[in-house]
Amino acid sequence: MISDLFSVTVLVGILASGIRLATPYLYAAIGETFSQRSGVLNLGVEGQMLLGAFAAFYVTLTTGNLWLGLMTAMLVGALMGLAMAYVTVNLQAQQGISGIGFYLFGLGMSDLLFQKLMGTVETVKGFPKIHIPGLSDIPGIGEIFFSQNILVYGAYLLVPIAWFVLNKTTLGLKIRSVGENPDAADSLGVNVGRIRYFTIILGGILSGVAGASLSIALLNVFQQNMTSGQGFIAVALVYFGAWRPTGVLGGALLFSLINALQLWVQVLNIPVPSEIAVMMPYVLTILVLVTSVSKVRAPSALSKPFEREN
Amino acid sequence: MTESNKLPSGRSRIDSLEMRGITKRFPGVLANYKVDFDVKSGEVHALLGVNGAGKSTLMKILYGLYHPDEGEILLNGKPVTISSPKDSIHLGIGMIHQHFMLVQTLTVAENVALGLPSSRGALTDLDRVSKRILELADIYNLKIDPSAYIWQLSVGQQQRVEIIKALYRGAALLILDEPTAVLTPQEVDELFVIMRQMVKDGHALIFISHKLHEVVEISHRVTVLRDGRKIGTRLTSETTKQDLANWMVGREVGFVPDRGKVEIGEIRLKLERVVCGSDRGTPGLRGVSLDVHSGEILGVAGVSGNGQRELAETITGLRKVTGGKVFLEGKEITNLAPGEITDRMLSYIPEERMRDGMIKDFTVAENMILREHHKLPYSRYGFLNLRGISKHADDLIKQFRVKTPSQETHAKNLSGGNIQKVVLAREISRNPHVIIAAQPTRGLDIGATEYVREQLLVERRKGAAIMLISEDLDEILALSDRIAVIYEGQIMDIVPRATATPEKLGLLMAGVHP
């Protein structure tokens, strides 16, 4: 029944899963924010997440060490980022197309490795919930905010850090200027290529973590194409959030809460066709994007390869 | 003595800088060949030449953006290597680029701080940067608000930010690459005041320009480049504008085009309180009324971005008119499709010739029939008549002296002047009744400029009504019969050429009624 949705237990459940589900979006979208603010559109996020998810899962499965799994995911993400940076900065490729290439690579490669190395779906014991004495025991609030695993906390911590780096550091100033007017930055001795390498690799690392958060912290399994478009949603969230970490946070939360709601709608057997329920977050994303994007301005140099005149 | 070595900014002077035997080759082009150039503390040395003469290349070498194939640079007598802007900045060389190198979405202070180490390590120190900007602004008498965003500033103010940026980095030698191109006459005067003060304080300034009167007014010495080679260096006081012009072009240049006497005829183009929007959603034109007669050139003067673009586009049907009416030879053409307006013998020479005037990847011949391609003899029943097209192209290439390897050459491979000749040939050869010419000589060298202006005068003699939209006051004054000044989408005033002076127009261009 619809009224079931409004019981305290269910509301707490929805909020807690909403907070948790935002985790991969936050990592991936904050990483994408960095690369877009420096003028690079990375559409390969989804592929980076998939390979990261597999790497984290497989290393954890074989070694039993979650941290080693996480670090492998970061390394894989970094390597994907490095390749993307080379293609984007040195070869000056069309970023939309090359990004899709990296997505397809990640999709195919993670599946191939999965078939070759594992063959069947297995599970691992992921990062455990952290129990904070006192706080976790507050009814409702405790379950929503203070009974999550380390990667969830990390994702939320990333938001103020990203804001601080972008707005209060010389590195952030360089990133913003390279995304707006790389010629000006170049004329002042800022190494445009190096800055973009940095942001693309950082984006890769965070996408790797995003994938790992799915496979060894939230779902604790690996299946082919398990990200099912979350990397692309993350790119959309960057637009939604108007290239600001706080905006990205708002978008990720909104999207995840709707997602959590539809999950609970299904769990509670509320008579809404499941196809409609599953569509809700995506329909919402499209609606919000078409209504909000026109009002904010993207970084001027977004997706334009940089080349000195002549 | 030690004190006199210091500039007001606290940095040391550059007593002399010398470039010796600089040669720079690009694929297929010899941009600089054995060029010698030097500048001293306390002087303005002008670098003069037509487009493509190699001025910018030489200066980009000095600033470290290009590397010379041959030659050396000596600073205070000692050889130095400049491999990047970082090096040149470190040596005390600053450059004010023709297209400002500013990040529009950042503040003045952020633009100044960009690329410099911060006194707080990894964190920005914008408060300290702002304080120092205000100190420098005070010393050099440059009014500027460090917390303002660049997009909020006028062009003149943005240029001041560029100067501050260079001074902040300790520039003792400043390269100014065509700094007056975007300024109103009043802003040019203000810039010259600043430049004179800097020179008095011991700075060395290099002033790049192709405007002769400015070179004569501000510089102490002048060096002329042509085809990448140095033609000579003179004391400015010992030359005349005519000498310099001949040097630049390599032949005698007719200065004031011969206008001849033309009877002014009937009204061909009429605008009645025309209103339209701009690309930014703000008002573009706010009630413009004008008329242009047969045999007349109406000059439209104004600082860039005051509605010139919108004016040309509403007349040609490229932009929607939201109020008022446009008449062509007595018939209303408001909001007709561009093709219908064109067919009524209106020709258009667009401001962005590479974007709106032609198709870069089409051949010269194809570009020459863009406007009339659907008519005989260029096509029939939808099939192109290649022979007719080819003959047309041959005729126009000869008649308009277009320098092109063949009519099959892609337009993008021509020089700027020849591209404009292709556009001009296409638009004029159809004997238009009305011509809208937007910035027809912008970026062209003296030779091509002269040619374009002559052609407009020829059309005027033939009775065409011409609207000449230009930001170049000299051009407006040389060609126009009457001059309309546009400011923030409105016509400030229309003055006959006889009573127009640069000062009067300059005030109108700044929105002030003299």
Image (cartoon, rainbow, N blue to C red):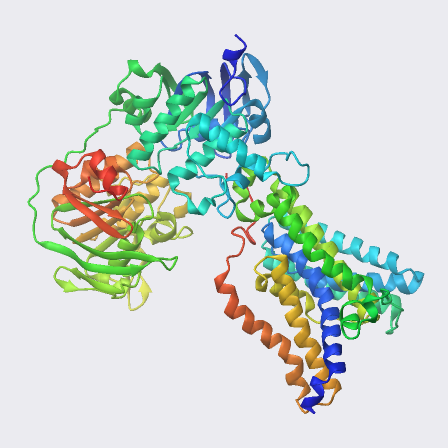
Is B336 left or right of B18, judged from the image as shown?
left
Where residue B351 appears, as percent x and y from the top left, is 32, 48
- Residue occupying the far top of the picture: B1
Where residue B308 appears, as percent x and y from the top left, is 29, 50
Residue at 42% over, 31% down: B142
Residue B253 visible at all: yes
Q: Where is B42 relative to B156, above or below?
A: above
Residue at 88% over, 56% down: A68
Residue A227 visible at all: no
Number of marks present in the image shown: 0
Q: Where is A152 relative to B175, above or below?
A: below
Decide which of A139, B271 is in the foreground and name it.
A139
Is A257 left or right of B94, judged from the image as shown?
right
Q: Where is B102 relative to A7, above or below?
A: above
Where residue A298 appears, as percent x and y from the top left, is 53, 56
Decide which of A39, A238 is in the foreground and name it.
A238
Where residue B80 appears, as percent x and y from the top left, is 59, 19
Residue B198 picture quarter? top left
Is A66 left or right of B264, judged from the image as shown?
right
Residue A222 picture quarter? bottom right
- Residue occupying the far right of the picture: A63
Q: Quadrant of the N terminus of chain A?
A: bottom right
